[in-house]
Amino acid sequence: MGGNQQDVRLTEAVKRFDRANADDPNTETVDGADHPKELLYARRMTAMLQQFVPEASDEVQLAVRCQHICRWKIPRETYPDGREGYRRWRSDLARFHADTAASILGEVGYDQELINRVSVLLRKERLKFDEEVQLLEDIACLVFLTHYLPAFVRKHDSTKVIQILRKTWRKMSDQGHAAALQLEWDKKTKAVVEAAVLSTH
């Protein structure tokens, strides 16, 4: 199919992803306006990808936009506390996101090969070995560091934040690390980031 038709499908898929995420009952306030949380997250993911790797494939662009699609439908509270419950939740979420996205991608006319590829990306299969899976992870980490870390630092003690940051840092590529070190934070957040990063070397 021609590039123009691909663009139409990509645009329509993004619209449908956004329409689904607009139903998020949870909101985040930005500049005095309330936004559905997962819709805001999806837009932040796309903006970060365009800044980081503007030439990314359609598959990556789609996966970035729908990584957390309808995430609120499987709340963490429905799983047991502790590491095992958390892992089950994350595993079920990945499958749910992949299945939800696959349905929409099929509706807009994408073939099974592309749908399967987006599903692989969303399930984060072969992280560290698949460049596009790694790219998706880098973008997610950069969005967390940019938009969510400062509030996380204010809410939790530094020991817990450093542990989370160490795990985040280990997931990222060298290119992701380089991009992260260019980010700007408030003084307290920067100090915690530096402590976490130094401890990984």
Image (tube, rainbow, N blue to C red):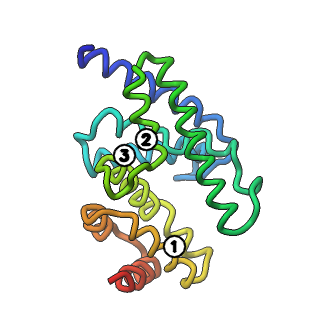
Do tag 1 and tag 2 residues touch (Cβ < 8 Å)? no
Q: Is residue 70 above or below residue 147?
A: above
- Residue 11 image-quadrant placement: top left
195 or 182, nearer to the observer: 195
Query: If you read the primary sequence from the N terminus, does the residue marked by circle 2 or circle 3 appear first?
Result: 3
Label 3 vs label 1: CA separation? 24 Å
Say which residue appears at 42% left-offset and 36% top-offset. Answer: 118
Q: Secondary structure at mark 2?
A: helix
* Residue linked to disc 2: 120
Say which residue appears at 51% left-offset and 29% top-offset. Answer: 102
Query: If you read the primary sequence from the N terminus, does the residue marked by circle 3 or circle 1 appear first?
Result: 3
Given the image, on which type of amino acid does mark 2 rest? Val
In the picture, the quarter occupied by the N terminus is: top left
Q: Secondary structure at mark 1?
A: helix
* Residue linked to disc 1: 164
Q: Nearer the viewer, mark 3 or mark 1?
A: 1
172 or 128, nearer to the observer: 128
157 or 172, nearer to the observer: 172
Task: Give x and y (percent) for residue 130.
Answer: 32, 50
